Amino acid sequence: MSQPLIGRVAVITGVSRRRGIGFAVASRLAAMGASLFIQHYRPHDADQPWGADKIDELVAELQPSLVSGASISEMSLDLSEAQAAEALIEAATTALGHLNILVCNHAKSGGDGPLAEMTAEKLDMHWRVNARSTLLATRAFAEQYDGREGGRVVWMTSGQGQGPMSDTIAYAMSKAALAGLTASVADGLLERKILLNTSSKTLTSTSCQPGPTETSAIARIRLDSHRGR
């Protein structure tokens, strides 16, 4: 693999288990030459059916992917907190210097439901984690960016635009907000020579989406389907 990211620094959120998109993204960026700053919040994944890995073991597994001269730092951070997004970017710049790439992979899962079960608390929590923190992290990333060509931000959405997600209204709402804001935010970031792309982590494969991603969450869905749930 070529190493076009030597000397670059990438921040990846939501890296707390090996069978996850965040870990796969971190591994690929490391192999391309980037130094890594990974955010995780293990208590969230620990409450999910797929569980969470030990962070020190996860970091040790990423180490061999780093090229000579690159480094990795990590931080546990609850992105539902109002100041967390800014704290993330500040910690990353303190640890590794100027940032070139931001991948907002994190997401709140669970504590959701259909419209009939929606509460202000459920809606607010998903908004704070999935949408608000992504926007604020992007703002903080752009403020520290030095204007050179090649700045990159990636947001992750879901399948909210491809069909009903009637049992996960709060999650779909928060991801739809990001999808709807992409063009507006991307236009402003271009002035700083930062390119924003939004990628869908949907279960439905379409011509403009990567399709299903083999993670522990998908494995759980398959197991429940096999059991007739």
Image (cartoon, helix red, strand yellow):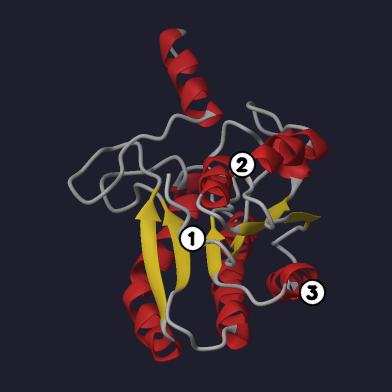
Dot 2 amino acid type: Ser
Q: Position of residue 187 (x, y in %)?
A: 34, 84
Nearer the observer, 145 or 121: 145
Side of 203 where 15 appears, left or right: right
Pointer 2 and pointer 3: residues touching (CB < 8 Å)? no
Tell me the element at label 2.
helix
Side of 177 where 61 appears, left or right: right
Q: Position of residue 165 (x, y in %)?
A: 37, 43
Q: Which residue is mark 1?
A: 174
Dot 1 amino acid type: Ser
Q: Nearer the viewer, mark 1 or mark 2?
A: 2
Residue 131 visible somewhere in the drawing: no
Kindly report the distance in space between the C-alpha atoms of the residues bearing marks 2 and 3.
Answer: 22 Å
- The residue sitting at 57% across, 46% down in the picture is 22
Q: Which residue is mark 2?
A: 65
- The residue sitting at 34% across, 47% down in the picture is 159
Q: Position of residue 99 (x, y in %)?
A: 62, 73
Badge 2: few (under 14), some or many (20 or more) residues near its Cα, within 10 Å? some
Query: Residue farthest to the top?
Result: 227
Query: Residue farthest to the bottom?
Result: 191
Q: Nearer the viewer, mark 2 or mark 3?
A: 2
Q: Which residue is mark 3?
A: 94
Q: Earlier in the sequence, mark 2 or mark 3?
A: 2
Please determine whether, in this image, residue 18 is positioned above or below residue 156: above
Kindly report the distance in space between the C-alpha atoms of the residues bearing marks 1 and 2.
Answer: 33 Å
Nearer the observer, 154 or 70: 70
Residue 94 visible somewhere in the drawing: yes
Q: Position of residue 112 (x, y in %)?
A: 56, 45
Kindly report the distance in space between the C-alpha atoms of the residues bearing marks 3 and 1.
Answer: 30 Å
Q: Quadrant of the N terminus?
A: top left
Dot 3 amino acid type: Thr
